[in-house]
Amino acid sequence: MNEQTTTGRLTVVGLGPGSPRQLTPEAHAAIEASSDLFGYGPYLDRIALLPGQTAHRSDNREEIARASAALELAASGRQVAVVSGGDAGVFAMAAAVCEAIEAGPEAWRELEISIVPGVTAMLAVAASVGAPLGHDFCALSLSDNLKPWETIEQRLRAAASAGFVIAIYNPVSRARPWQLDRAFTILREELPETVPVVFGRAAGRADEKMTLTDLASAEGALADMATCVIIGSPETRTVARNGLPPLVYSPRSAGRPT
Amino acid sequence: MNEQTTTGRLTVVGLGPGSPRQLTPEAHAAIEASSDLFGYGPYLDRIALLPGQTAHRSDNREEIARASAALELAASGRQVAVVSGGDAGVFAMAAAVCEAIEAGPEAWRELEISIVPGVTAMLAVAASVGAPLGHDFCALSLSDNLKPWETIEQRLRAAASAGFVIAIYNPVSRARPWQLDRAFTILREELPETVPVVFGRAAGRADEKMTLTDLASAEGALADMATCVIIGSPETRTVARNGLPPLVYSPRSAGRPT
């Protein structure tokens, strides 16, 4: 801890994809300045605690309970950090903290809240294979825990038919085994089967694994919970290289809608 | 320069939104390890050159010429970095480099190319106001220099009606003065006029300016070339606070499509 103040505060910190080389100095400083750190266990495991810091671990399905516990401690005067993998604002804890503040006691609306952005997974995956997000794209969570599957299907069709590249977060889990295959089936109805598909696992980390295929061959078994899937638009291209992996990119220019 | 090798290479580096506190250690190291840096002048101005490093400045409309010059120098054996603001893969130089490799001489396909991701503008803007990108969202360039305006209108309507939050890059320029107002007109046909709109300028920098309004009051005059505009979905909420700016966030849950 670098400082002690009498007023509590809460900072939501994006840790980036996993490598310390992709953690910003701002995020590092925010972690060092906190007395208490909240987060999903594997994210907290990335942090070497300083003397006097306390880690509060929780499961990955308990976002609102975690946010509320963190806000309560901040309101009591502590310097609290809530950590997320990637960027704190993309399918992560910043929205859960805002939601808890809106539903919580009046005192939480007087707390100093800051959010420290980070490199979100799709950016790290894209960088590893070229520039598939080089033109218009969308980011979509495939989890139907908190939204109807019907909404997800509608969004997949709308994004694909309008020409957006699609980055899929939360593609599968033990409780959601079929959704990604169903998504590919839907996308095959909207897109050419030749569009490139990237399965990016643990981007930027030592165990990084990038799998490049096309929509015809894409299948759910290629993804796990740590995978971000990027599905190209009809404009996305693959450049073969000599002795090197191909580059996948979406050109800066686009044609007329069909 | 930390090392000399006999083989040239090219690294495309995302510098983040502007503050050195949001530049990753990986990006910093990539810049230090390069002999030659290419980029749009204002991005190169952020970098303190080391002895022996050469800066190659170009205008912001010359991406392919810049990428080709950088590749040519890398092919001659130099350690080249091409810098972009934000993330190198989002409406930035990584796609231009891939495009130049595809169109260029065979030797460029044998070059070692790496891309270093960064915090892209929309993430920094979102973090400054809450978590407007907390659920499904898209990123769209409003520049019609390289795609027909008709395509942009179609994408705006598709994204808005499907419930995506929309982050607009390149909202205006001297040569494109009317497009953003036209985009708001289109969006008012697809969305409630109460959805929050954030104009985020220079996020994370000393001269950061965030303007929060709603779709009814949004107008092009609130943006300049350094602005990223975020338009909420019908689910995006604004939380008033006591003596603090409101929080804007998109909840993790979503309803059925209408």
Image (cartoon, coloured by chain):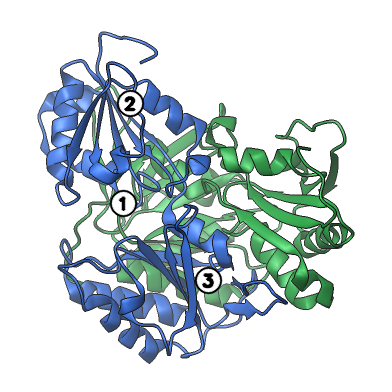
Chain colours: A blue, B green
At 56% from the left and 41% from the top, the residue drawn is B17
Q: Residues within 10 Å of mark 1 (few under 14, many from 20)?
A: many
Chain for numbered disc 1:
B
Circle 2: is it few (<14), some (14-19), or many (20+) Cα within 10 Å?
A: some
The quarter of the picture where residue A67 lies is top left
Query: Please, what secondary structure does the residue beneath circle 2 have?
Result: loop
Secondary structure beneath label 3? helix
Q: Is residue B80 left or right of residue B187?
A: right
Q: CA distance from mark 1 to mark 3?
A: 24 Å
The residue tagged with tag 1: helix, strand or loop? loop
Q: What is the quadrant of residue B28 in the picture? A: top right
Q: Which residue is mark 3?
A: B152
Instruction: Identify the image quadrant of residue B1.
Output: top right
Q: Position of residue B116 (x, y in %)?
A: 60, 51
Q: CA distance from mark 2 to mark 3?
A: 48 Å
Name the amino acid type tagged 3.
Ile
Q: Is residue A102 visible?
A: no
Please tell me if label 2 and label 3 are on a single chain.
Answer: no
User: Of label 1 and label 3, which has the lower sequence position?
Assistant: 1
Amino acid at the residue labelled 2:
Leu
The residue under label 2 is A49
In front here: B177 or A104?
A104
- The residue under label 1 is B134
Residue A211 x/y as whole percent: 47, 73
Q: Position of residue B141 (x, y in %)?
A: 56, 62
Q: Nearer the viewer, residue B14 or A110?
A: B14
A224 or B125: nearer the viewer: A224
- On screen, residue B218 above or below A232: above
Residue B131 in view of the camera = yes
* Amino acid at pointer 1: Gly
Q: Is residue B88 left or right of residue B258?
A: right
Judge left or right: residue B209 versus residue B8.
left
